[in-house]
Structures are given as C-alpha cells and as structure tokens.
Image (cartoon, helix red, strand yellow):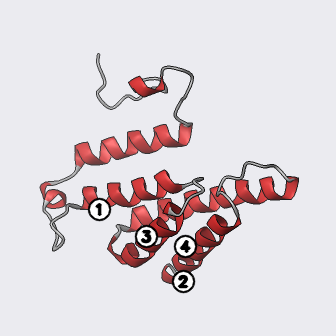
Amino acid sequence: MNDPLKVEKLDHPDLVDGIVWSDCELEWIRAYGLRCYNYAAANTKPDESGMTPDEIDLIAHCVFRYVSGRMTTIVGDAVNFLISHWSEFPEHTQKRIKTELETEMRRDDEARAEGRPYRALGQDCDRRDWDRLLAHIEEKMK
C-alpha cells in the first residue's frame, strides 16, 4: 500500500548524491504532513494577515531552518523577523523552534570548546544573534 505521508531520506531528487535529511527533519516532515492532512476546516481559514495557521507555521519554521548555521547578514535579519513576529506563531511552532535552537546551541558550545572551525550557529556575530533570539523566547515563554 502506498503511504503518501511516508518520507525516506532519499525521497527528494536534490538529495540523490549523498545529501540526506536528518532523522529530526524527517520526523518534522512526517508530523507536519499529518497535521496538514488532519487539520479541521477551522484551521484552514486565514487570519487577519490573510494567512492560515499552517502557512504561518511553515514560514516561521522555514526561516529558522534556513538560517541555522549560516554565516551571513541573513542571520540577523531572520532573528529580527522571528522576534518581531514571535507572538503570531502557534505555540507548537514556538516550542519547536526553542527546542531546536537549544540543541544547536549545545552543538555550537561543544564545537567552540573543542576549537573546531565549523560551528553549528556560525561565527561569533551570528551566535550573538541566536543568543538574542533565545533570550527573547525565554522572556516570552515565562
């Protein structure tokens, strides 16, 4: 039987040359697919922004995922976006971003402590932006 929500590491055509999705990303894709598949009609109505909760959730998560580990000015711009729109994101999105950010911060801390050149959250200026986002999240989620 064909399961439309089944996602494997090499399902995406861009990933055939050895690039694979992490188990965490696959789990998110599966969970997101199930949520979209099972959402009631009330969840597909746009809010005052004209966006559905699914669209807001997707944008927040994609912005976070895209900039994680980047070493450009996009990090500061994305963090500013996430902070300024934080209250608009669904609670489950806020929790997921917080959890993933804390995980990446641990990885980044380990890399810095060991003197590795690659750091999960980029250079020092990028890390300061991520620290700023986590401080904002912790303040808002008290």
Q: How far apart are marks 3 and 1 (CA)?
A: 11 Å
Q: Which of marks 3 and 1 is nearer the N terminus?
A: 1
In this image, 56 relative to 19: left or right?
left
- In this picture, is 125 found above or below 141? above
Is disc 2 placed on a helix, strand or loop? helix
Q: In which quarter of the image is the N terminus?
A: top left
Q: Residue 82 carries which label?
A: 3
Residue position for label 1: 56
User: Which callout, 3 or 1, points to the residue nearer the camera?
Assistant: 3
User: Which callout, 2 or 3, points to the residue nearer the camera?
Assistant: 3
Type of the residue with mark 1: Ile
Type of the residue with mark 2: Glu
Residue position for label 4: 133
Is disc 1 placed on a helix, strand or loop? helix
- In this picture, is 81 found above or below 4? below
- In this picture, is 123 found above or below 37? below
Q: Residue at x 26, y 56 (%)?
A: 54
